[in-house]
Image: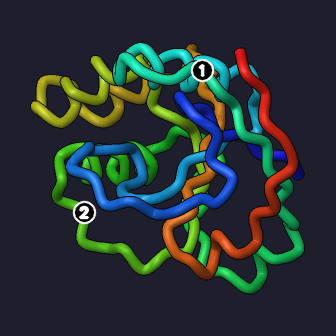
Amino acid sequence: MKLYHGSNMTVQKPQILTSDRKLDFGTGFYLTSSLEQAGRWAALTADRRGSGVPTITVYEFDETKLAELKILKFEKANRKWLDFVAANRDNTVNDQKWDMVIGPVANDRTMPVIRLFIAKVYTASEALRRLLPQKLHDQYTFKTQNALQFLKFLEVIEK
């Protein structure tokens, strides 16, 4: 399967960088199966950093290797997904035993809802009700070197 990483530069050799940014699935190397979503991430990253050019790095991931990894997969935005994203965004997640986490992305349109859920303004059912109409693309978060070894660099697309 092809996966895409949007950034302000080419990333031929992915790494797991420690960051103070609070991301949906915690620390890891983030990709998506959506070229469109990767393009938005690339433009946003170049804009936020004020350097580089929007760049999409394309990888091949051998899905048969999933059986060799510890995977946490969310099929849709449900209560477990919401709790996991909220814990990562709130920096209270304790469970980091996964090689990969796969599931919907909380994008700029969904983050206000998740922030209000974290602040306990919305209940989980209200937050999910507000999130359901939105088309949430997927994200694949590679959290360990063991997982990264199965990514093969293919090409670069500059936007």
Q: Secondary structure at mark 2?
A: loop
User: x, y percentage for residue 37?
Assistant: 65, 24
Task: Quadrant for the C terminus, please.
Answer: top right
User: x, y percentage for residue 82?
Assistant: 38, 43
For the point 56% across and 77% down, which residue is it?
A: 145
| Quarter holding residue 135 | top right
In the image as oriented, which residue stretches furthest toward the front? 52
Crowding around mark 2 (Cα neighbors within 10 Å: few <14, some 14 to 19, many 20+) is: some
Looking at the image, residue 5 sits to the left or right of residue 94; the answer is: right
Whether 98 is drawn above or below 127: the answer is below
Number of numbered callouts drawn: 2
For the point 61% across and 72% down, which residue is it?
A: 71
Would you name the residue on which mark 1 appears? Answer: 54
For the point 62% across and 51% down, which residue is it?
A: 140
The one nearer the camera, 17 or 84, is: 17
Which residue type carries mark 1? Pro
Whether 141 is drawn above or below 90: the answer is below
User: x, y percentage for residue 23?
Assistant: 35, 44
For the point 22% across and 27% down, which residue is it?
A: 115
Q: Nearer the viewer, mark 1 or mark 2?
A: 1
Would you name the residue on which mark 2 appears? Answer: 93
Q: Secondary structure at mark 1?
A: loop
User: x, y percentage for residue 87?
Assistant: 25, 52
Q: Kindly report the distance in space between the C-alpha atoms of the residues bearing marks 1 and 2.
A: 31 Å
Which residue type carries mark 2? Val
Q: Are marks 1 and 2 in contact (CB under 8 Å)?
A: no
Residue 130 appears in the figure: no
Residue 132 appears in the figure: yes
